[in-house]
Amino acid sequence: MNQSVLCVGKFDADGLDKLERQLAIQTASIRRLRDQNLDQGTEDEAETAAMDTATRDVIATYGRGITIAPQAESRPLIPLFEADGHAVPAALKVDHEKMGYDFYSVEVIFTILLPKDEYASSATFDLEITDDATNVARKTRPIQLFPERQDKDYFRADFEGAVGIDADMKLSLPLSVAGTVVPFLQLTPEAKLKAKMVVGPFSFPFRRAAIEVTGEQSQKVHWGYNLQSTLKGANTFKSMLILKVAKETTRVGFEADLQIVPCKSSWYLIRQHLPPIPVHAQLVVELAR
């Protein structure tokens, strides 16, 4: 239940020219501010040289682009509950048997393949859910997301956490006594039982970030990460959804639009002015048909 491609986002010649002009204006402004507070000297000359080097490096990076490895993994939940001997929640059983809906857990994974000395300073993911259902009322939609807006307090450190699905077919986080997410490798049977987890656990890469989420119960979902750490090299971001899919639907997909702002420690003087690099990906959700 795995579908993976490689996508590259980069600036074209016109975009690079515009970026170069913007950086020239911004670095000139920085230099004027420096000159007002410092006498011309070695320190100022060193900063000027550093900005010139950083600008050339930024232009090269935006011209080379960013490679993203997106992936979607899906699992039909009702057969999984039944195979494991768990009762399907009554409301979802009625939706399934009387209304003709299936339910899928879907993990959407975006691995940003950056050079070892680069990191992402921000990342946004917009997912539009598409399908071939002709009845608008029966269009595929998420009934659960992770993360949601109320989950933002869990994103205070960089670690692999655990997420599962509970007996009510809702996404569940096993928490420690202190109220923090239990690391994936430290999940105990007691913590799993307390979280009422019946499916999972699944590993989830938490990042130290300020996050925003919009689009719960909608076919258009947005996740934004203002990253507060500088993990260099490849970085993985994951979003989880529980989808409600009409039985007559034969195709479900995601139109994914990502915007990534790359950064290096040597770009410290100009990094706040860097624009995002857009990347578009199309993902197919495999259905048990």
Image (cartoon, rainbow, N blue to C red):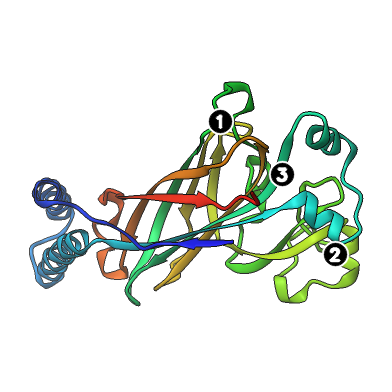
For discs 3 and 1, the disc positioned in front in the rendered view: 1
Secondary structure of residue under mark 2:
helix
Q: Nearer the viewer, residue 251 or 22?
A: 251
Q: Disc 1 designates what residue?
A: 133
Where residue 263 sits: x, y (%)?
32, 63
Secondary structure of residue under mark 1:
loop
For discs 3 and 2, the disc positioned in front in the rendered view: 3
Residue at (79%, 57%) from the top-left corner?
Answer: 80
Q: Quadrant of residue 217?
A: top right
Q: Nearer the viewer, residue 40 or 54?
A: 54
| Residue type of the residue flagged with mark 3 | Phe
Where residue 235 sits: x, y (%)?
46, 67
Q: Is residue 276 above or below residue 192?
A: above
Badge 3 or badge 1: first in the primary sequence: 3
Q: Disc 3 designates what residue?
A: 103
Please give the label number shown on residue 192.
2
| Residue type of the residue flagged with mark 2 | Lys
Compared across the picture, whether 222 is left or right of 202 comes to left
| Residue type of the residue flagged with mark 1 | Ala
> Cα distance, mark 3 to mark 1?
15 Å
Residue at (91%, 68%) from the top-left corner?
Answer: 190
Where residue 145 sits: x, y (%)?
65, 44
> Cα distance, mark 3 to mark 2?
22 Å
Q: Are marks 2 and 1 in contact (CB under 8 Å)?
A: no
Image quadrant occupied by the N terminus: bottom right
Compared across the picture, whether 130 is left or right of 263 comes to right
Q: Is residue 252 above or below residue 27?
A: above
> Cα distance, mark 2 to mark 1?
37 Å
Q: Are marks 3 and 2 in contact (CB under 8 Å)?
A: no
Compared across the picture, whether 9 is left or right of 284 comes to left
